[in-house]
Image (cartoon, rainbow, N blue to C red):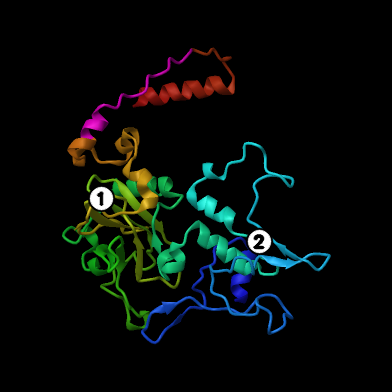
């Protein structure tokens, strides 16, 4: 549990499955930990093992005050002072926030209290050991990665049937997508799984690509919209031959096409797979219900569905603002810059 406590102090997320064990049937079970309160008598009601996320109301949230009387702690308050403001109404908050506010303070048990608050916010990670390994929303830097993907694709897309000068390396360059036993999850990958560098190169060697590396792996839907992207680092002298990640696509997705972008060998497209449009991620509902203006920016107009095409057609471009003329001194920096822009436009 020590690494968990250290991570909590650093403000990082800690999985409740850190010390999980399998039962006799092979199923993963949450671990159990001893009481955090030191020097507690063995006969004390709190002196028992606990499971992350669970606590006992009326026991774990009690201690003794200065007069040796039992004191019971409540949930987290959102105001200063002892009394709530007159207009206080917890029901105005989302349900998961209300559940968080109901979790009481547990004196002497900070890790137990933290796990209880995490479970109140979202119980799903406590029910599924691999929940956090599945991406359910776009990574925060997806707009920048999308621009990089478009730039890489502007030089041409390679595929298994059109490998260009990289013929013979298709097995390590063409990405693949496939469904998983989880009904809402798809996995995309690229490379050769289980490859051992001591066995020699994974495919044929081509001069100039010895230290090439995967920049990012991504997927597009039936309209060409980016639905997930994950960047990968450069491992230098120790290249990695296989990359993969799993994600829950947004609702409305009927087709998923995997893509991979390498630093030297460019962008590659894999074969698309079909997907049930009724199955998807709750966290990406914003994507399913995106405004027509955003759809116009993300989608390929030639692939738009009839309904989306009608919405996009109704979008009117913003009215342009008239640029006012500015007179700069002849030998000022601004004046010289304006001259340079004028020469550039004439040269075009």
Farthest front residue in view? 69
Q: Looking at the picture, does residue 129 appear above or below residue 102?
A: below
Looking at the image, residue 70 sits to the left or right of residue 77; the answer is right
Q: Residues within 10 Å of mark 2 (few under 14, many from 20)?
A: many
| Magenta range | 309-324
The one of 284 and 210 positioned closer to us in this rendering: 284
Residue 101: % across, % down: 58, 53
At x 26% / y 48%, what residue is drawn?
252
At x 24% / y 28%, what residue is drawn?
313
- Residue 253 badge: 1
Residue 16: % across, % down: 51, 70
Numbered disc in front, either 2 or 1: 2
Q: Is residue 220 magenta?
A: no
Q: Secondary structure at mark 1?
A: loop
Q: Which numbered disc, 2 or 1, marks the residue that appears first in the sequence? A: 2
Farthest bottom residue in view? 24
Q: Residues within 10 Å of mark 1 (few under 14, many from 20)?
A: many
The one of 137 and 144 positioned closer to us in this rendering: 137
Query: Which residue is denoted by mark 2 in the rendering?
Result: 105
At x 48% / y 21%, what residue is drawn?
339
Q: Quadrant of the N terminus?
A: bottom right
The one of 249 and 244 positioned closer to us in this rendering: 249
Query: Separation of disc 2 and disc 1 at Cα?
Result: 43 Å
Farthest left residue in view? 161
Q: Secondary structure at mark 2?
A: loop
Q: Is residue 322 magenta?
A: yes
Residue 347: % across, % down: 36, 26
- Residue 108 badge: none
């Amino acid at each position: 549990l020590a690494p968990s406590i250290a991570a909590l102090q650093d403000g990082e997320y800690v999985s409740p499955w850190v010390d999980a064990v399998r039962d006799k049937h092979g199923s993963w079970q949450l671990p159990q930990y001893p009481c955090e309160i030191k020097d507690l008598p063995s006969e004390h009601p709190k002196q028992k093992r606990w499971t992350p996320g669970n606590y006992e109301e009326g026991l774990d949230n009690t201690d003794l005050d200065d007069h040796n009387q039992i004191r019971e702690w409540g949930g987290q308050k959102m105001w200063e002072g002892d009394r709530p403001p007159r207009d206080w109404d917890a029901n105005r908050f989302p349900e998961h926030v209300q559940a968080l506010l109901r979790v009481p303070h547990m004196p002497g048990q900070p890790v137990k209290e933290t796990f209880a608050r995490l479970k109140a916010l979202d119980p799903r990670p406590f029910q599924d050991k691999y929940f956090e390994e599945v991406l359910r929303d776009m990574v925060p830097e997806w707009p920048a990665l999308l621009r990089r993907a478009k730039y890489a694709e502007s030089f041409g897309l390679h595929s298994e049937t059109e490998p260009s000068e990289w013929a013979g390396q298709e097995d390590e360059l063409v990405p693949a997508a496939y469904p998983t036993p989880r009904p809402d999850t798809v996995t995309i990958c690229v490379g050769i799984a289980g490859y051992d560098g001591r066995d020699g190169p994974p495919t044929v060697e081509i001069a100039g690509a010895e230290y090439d590396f995967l920049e990012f792996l991504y997927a597009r839907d039936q309209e060409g919209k980016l639905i997930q992207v994950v960047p990968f680092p450069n491992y230098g002298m120790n290249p990695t031959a296989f990359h993969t990640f799993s994600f829950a696509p947004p609702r409305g997705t009927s087709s998923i096409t995997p893509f991979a972008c390498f630093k030297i060998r460019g962008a590659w497209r894999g074969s698309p797979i079909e997907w049930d449009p009724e199955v998807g991620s709750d966290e990406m509902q914003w994507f399913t219900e995106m405004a027509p203006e955003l759809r116009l920016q993300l989608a390929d107009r030639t692939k738009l569905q009839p309904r989306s095409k009608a919405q996009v057609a109704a979008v009117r471009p913003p009215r342009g603002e008239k640029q006012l003329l500015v007179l700069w001194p002849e030998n000022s920096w601004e004046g010289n810059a304006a001259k340079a822009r004028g020469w550039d436009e004439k040269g075009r």
